[in-house]
Amino acid sequence: MQTKIEALAAEPVDPADALAKFGVGQPMRRIEDRRFITGAGLYTDDEREPGMLHAAFLRSPHAHAGIRSVDVAAAAAAPGVVAVFTGADWQAAGLTGLPLRPTIKQADGSPIATPPRPGLAVGRVRHVGDCVALVVAKTARAALDALELIAVDYAPLPCVVDAREALQTTAPALWPDHAPGNLGFLWRVGDADKTAGALASAAHVVTLDLVNNRLVPNSMEPRGVVVRHDAATGRVTLSGSIQNPFGFQSLLCELFGWPKDKLRCRADDVGGGFGCKNQLQPEHAMMVLVCEKLKRTVKWVNDRSGSFVSDAHARDLSTTVRLGLDASGRFVALAVETVANLGAYMSTNGALIPTLPTAAVLGGAYTIPAISMQVHAAFTNTVPVDAYRGAGRPEAIYLLERTIDVAARQLGIPAARLRRKNLIRPAQLPYRTALGRDIDSGAFETVLTRALELADEKGFAKRAALAKKHNARRGLGIAYYLEATLGPPADSARIAFAPDGSAVISVGTQSNGQGHETSFTQIAAAQFGIAPDAIAYRQADTDITPEGGGHGGSRSLQLGGTAVLLAARQIIAKGKRIAAHLLEAGEADIEYRPGRYAIAGTDRGVSFTEVVTASFDPARLGPDMAPGLDETARYEREGFNYPNGAHVCEIEVDLATGIPRIVNYVVVDDFGRIINPLIVRGQVTGGIVQGIGQALYEDTRYDASGQLVTASFMDYSLPRADDLPPITLELFQDAPTRTNPLGAKGCGEAGATGAPPAVVNAVVDALEEFGVVHLDMPLTREKLWSAIQGAKR
Amino acid sequence: MYEFKFHRPATVRQAANLLAKNEDAKLVAGGHTLIPVMKQRLASPPHLVDLSKVENLSGIEMKGRALSIGAMTTHADVAGSPIVGEAIPALAYLAGVIGDPAVRHRGTIGGSLANNDPTADYPAACLALGATIVTNKRRLKAEEFFAGLFTTALESDEIITRVTFPLPKKAAYVKFRNQASRYALVGVFVARRPSDVGVAVTGAGADGVFRVTAFEEALKKRFASKALEGLSVPADGLNADIHGSAEYRAHLIGVLAARAVDAANGK
């Protein structure tokens, strides 16, 4: 799995570096899997307690409608019902909209539109699935029964679901007072004049219109929370399926005007998030409000149908790309104009996703001297759009890698050669992009070459010829992705030892299933030279763990993992003083190797575990030493880093049916230094599968009346195991980043970033003889069949 | 799910009596269609009559020149049965491509036929093979049994007990799955019988499963995929939805029928 390629621009690895030993870099099996596989995990719906109440939300069946009245009398009187809430209760509590943290301003410097998103609809519903009322009952079933007794008098309004249509002057207005013309914002980045000038004088300009299709996140565990009230202290605790307890605490306290110590937020096991559990949603706010009112424990778990129409959707962009090339095929300029669909409300990170993270990697791993982008973001009568695996970077890479393939065909240059010609060379590193980002490390051409080698690019022509014999066509698709790890900039970790030599690691970030429990433990175990099972793991609890930025942006290992490393180093430093005291030697003479302190040049030493034990015994400590080994460290990133790699997809399209079958998939990833290759493989595979899903299968369709017609797994197609190819993964580790002490670049989102363009490039390559230049995702079987038929006609 | 009364009879007669006595009672076989719909509160039968403990409703055996499969036999049992594999391998194959493993271990042949989902697999096999659906009251030819979308000739207190399939000389099923649901977007079952040819299509027909007589006539003259060249099924009367237009389905019927004939011929 880990094949080292010739070192290029690599930092020499210190052989004494503990990270190179004791498990780091080893494919250690995941500690948490036993719990998950045996059903011993603690997910939201596993939480039970006597007297716990159950909540259920009434959702709008209309895409856009005024609410004339909501009659809850019958529901409130139904058996088992404790309380029923409507938008009137939200208003009565003095609340307007969920808090937002706009991170961008419009191109003219004005603020973006932030129309108020209430916990329950006030006067109007704006998408199918919008929350209208909330029933709290003694059982989940009583709550569902009562929902059916609520009478809502709707006055249906015309609706719009397409962002480009929403920006037309004739479109129905969702927010006439807050967002005239449905415009959420117009945002620009880059030097538009310079880019326009470079395009005007370019030898070739390749233009491509493309759509990045809307996706439904479909985490395996639906969203849900349990909210508890403590009568003794008046405090409220929210636990559940969320990605960022500290973020939730901050947003909810801002909403309710509470001091932070009034609200505790925590997450136990979380069954997948992919971004959709990062937003503060109306249900969360209502659950806290209701708990505070009723002073009872209340549980809410979304069902799958509710998830389809309320989990923040993803992507949904229409883009025009113009790529300028000089006569030799060098990229000279890239201009991008996008219309982004925000959905009905500005979601927590809704304004961020199509703007800054896209700009962070726009231009990819190529030298492009002039880049500009503008984004019109529109409100529509659809589920709000927010972060989803990759969050803005897959969009940037898709538009670029597709356009490069179109350019290669137009210019008659092989797609791989055109990429090589333009990839940033090692000598150019660190490379400042036209949008001001500094790419610190990478060996892009080496990685691409290796991927093409593993994919047997040389043998492709022969395989393509064979395919023709059975009425099929083969295509080879390449995508070189550049990622930028993002999210909040800091994380903290605490490591506390007990006298028996066992330790507890507490981190503020959290796992949604990625395996932090294992990776973080490996980092610490390697430092201490102790067995991983002597270390327990705690995550994401605003009361008991140090602060963290949550899960998102492929950030956890490099920030939280580094914080663990720093806390471990602090422990080791303190241990050194204790060891010196025990060995009656000067501290400067003590050497530490994982597991043991020794007096340099002698065989006299003391084990790390003995030092731990001694640290709790005042009699064995020096006069100025506090007992115990308990250290907290905070790490704030010094700079962004740029995971990158090459995806090569070989696909065969059956001409009679249009069925695309991926026959081979190769990826070479540069994630810097690897802590646990087994976990990395899992992350990459999952990401690629989601990317293949977007490219071939996942079709989120609204009809003209604003109904989501793909609102269940009967109609929304997720990729299945038997749709998927074997994936060859190689990890290139010879270009570690210098932006963090681990040398690690994030790996969580890379697969979903590289796969869509690789798959689409492969299909378009396969159908070249039919005149296919571009097809929008998902590349369904009928779409391919129609393209083939179109050429035959 | 709403409240309902659950009955678990031990004999077919008891089950039929429960159906006769309780209006709107529903039989539960594998439950893989009914239960999800009840969970979504889209169906609320006041009585459920569970067939799982009724004696003599499952099992696979040869009866003379016919294969007999009990109504409560699961898809997994049919797929894995050496008897079916020997007698009509195409039927075992079909059972093995229904749904997913969970569905195949709960879903039953009787339940599938009684539901007559227009995208289910078994109806195509029954029609093409000339199966007989045996109930507590009578024997129904497949032709008489299927009566349109989710509709059959079954009376309200009639219960399928088994299905018998006369052995074909050759047969094959080719399924083009709905990418999302894994039901048949189009499924074609082709059977060369001793004195007939059956070509039955599921998934595509606006009225459910149907036979393609033009294909059958051509194949009777020559049982080879070449015999189908130039023949096609009109798109009129076929399903059209987000998963496939009527034209695409019509085209697929031709492609799959030819592939099924090739498969039946061992090609």
Image (cartoon, rainbow, N blue to C red):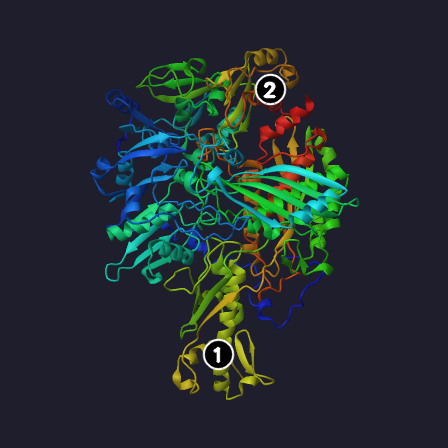
Residue contact at pointers 1 and 2, CB within 8 angstroms: no
Element type where label 1 sits in the image: helix
Nearer mark to the viewer, of 1 and 2: 1
Element type where label 2 sits in the image: helix
Q: Is residue A456 visible?
A: no
- What amino acid type is highlighted by mark number 2? Gly
Q: Which mark is residue A574?
A: 1
Residue B198 position (above or below residue A726): above
Q: On the picture, is B74 further left or further right than A122? A: right
Q: On the picture, is A184 further left or further right than A753? A: left
User: How far across and down, in percent of the image, does residue A524 sit?
Assistant: 50, 67
Crowdedness near tag 1: few (<14), some (14–19) or many (≥20) residues, C-alpha within 10 Å: some
Residue A405 position (above or below residue A570): above
Q: Which mark is residue B219?
A: none
User: How far across and down, in percent of the image, does residue A13 sit?
Assistant: 65, 68
For the residue pair A519 and A244, the one nearer the viewer reads as A244
User: How far across and down, in percent of the image, does residue A58 sit?
Assistant: 33, 38
Residue A680, picture quadrant: bottom right
Q: Chain of mark 2?
A: B
Q: On the picture, is A460 further left or further right than A534? A: right
Residue A262 position (above or below residue A337): below
Residue ID for mark 2? B254
Residue at the far right in the pictured view: A328
For the residue pair B230 and A84, the one nearer the viewer reads as A84
For the residue pair A237 and A487, the one nearer the viewer reads as A487
User: How far across and down, in percent of the image, does residue A410 sit?
Assistant: 74, 37
Quarter of the image that includes the N terminus of chain A: bottom right
